[in-house]
Amino acid sequence: MAVASLNPDAELVEKPETAVHRLGEQVFDMVAEIGDVGLFSVQTLIWIFRRRPRWSVLVPIFYAIGVQSVSVVAVTGTFIGMVLAVQAHHEFQMMGLATRLGSVINISLVKELGPVLAATMLAGRVGSSMAAELGTMRVTEQIDALSALGTNPIYYLAVPRFMACLLLIPLLTLMADFMGVIGGAVVSTQVMGIDSFAYWKHSRDYVEGLDIFAGIFKSYFFGAAIALISCHRGFNSSAGAEGVGKAATEAFVYSFMAILFLDFVLGIGWNTVYRSFWPQASGLL
């Protein structure tokens, strides 16, 4: 008969890790990461109201995020409008609704595709760059040096980038909308042979100012999410070149997921509010 050991110093036998344990660890890590991002976001917002960054710091960041993204966003918006025209023309022609193609293309652009694609391009071009830059500063201990000199790193590094993304992405969204509308109109009227007057008439009848405002309203949330997630990944980058590359990749992936999630939530909220204040338009949504 085996006798249990009464020695309190006896070595405990470690149980093998199971899939449930690994899943639990991943869930706890995800919750902790979300909480860390939330705390980082609150600190960033607090510093915005406490002290405005100097223009000498803001202007170069505004130029890098806004001006240098214009060409990428413009080309993307143009081709999205052209692709929509090419893909939707055949189906609308079969239904005898080819002249209404402009309303579908333009309302899709200003409400959904323009804001989402502009934010996606900003996340890929700017978000990854911010995460890599801040990650390099973390690895080379420049962020620690700012703290040692009495400067809050969030105020000096994260706040200007957050303000640039928040203020400039609506302008980039308008650029994507405009170029998409022009690209779709050129293909529809010049290549597909749709009557120009009917194309623009139906666009004017179905696309309202509130539709444009809905896209601009969403873009503010997209820009804020891109800036906060990218800066957070850069601040928490692991050591080495691999860590910096991982931070840049995670910044884009998480930002893109946040854009899609926010687009879904804000779309439901906007449609609910729209139906509440304009019941006569509920059948058109």
Image (cartoon, rainbow, N blue to C red):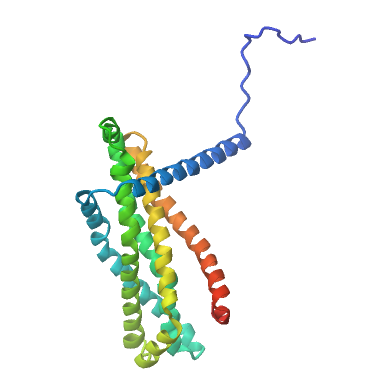
- State whether residue 253 is above or below residue 200: above
Give the residue furthest to the top.
7
Q: Can residue 129 be seen at all in this image of the molecule?
A: no
Give the residue furthest to the left.
56
In which quadrant will I find the N terminus?
A: top right
Give the residue furthest to the right.
1
Q: Residue at x 37, y 61 (%)?
A: 119
Residue 56, percent from left and from top: 19, 50
Residue 90, percent from left and from top: 45, 84
- On the image, which quarter does residue 66 sit in? bottom left
Q: Quick one: 95 or 273, which is closer to the camera?
A: 273
Q: Quick one: 209 or 54, which is closer to the camera?
A: 54
Q: Is residue 284 left or right of 171 when viewed as pictured? A: right
In which quadrant will I find the C terminus?
A: bottom right
Q: Residue at x 41, y 71 (%)?
A: 213
Residue 181, percent from left and from top: 35, 78
How many marks are shown on the rendered structure? Answer: 0
Residue 62, percent from left and from top: 25, 56
Q: Residue at x 56, y 36 (%)?
A: 25
Q: Quick one: 220 or 183, which is closer to the camera?
A: 220
- State whether residue 259 is above or below residue 149: below
Q: Is residue 275 left or right of 92 when viewed as pictured? A: right
Q: Residue at x 71, y 9 (%)?
A: 5
- State whether residue 267 is above or below residue 65: below
Q: Can residue 185 be seen at all in this image of the molecule?
A: yes
- On the image, which quarter does residue 190 sit in? bottom left
- State whether residue 162 is above or below residue 213: above
Q: Is residue 67 left or right of 30 when viewed as pictured? A: left
- On the image, which quarter does residue 73 sit in? bottom left
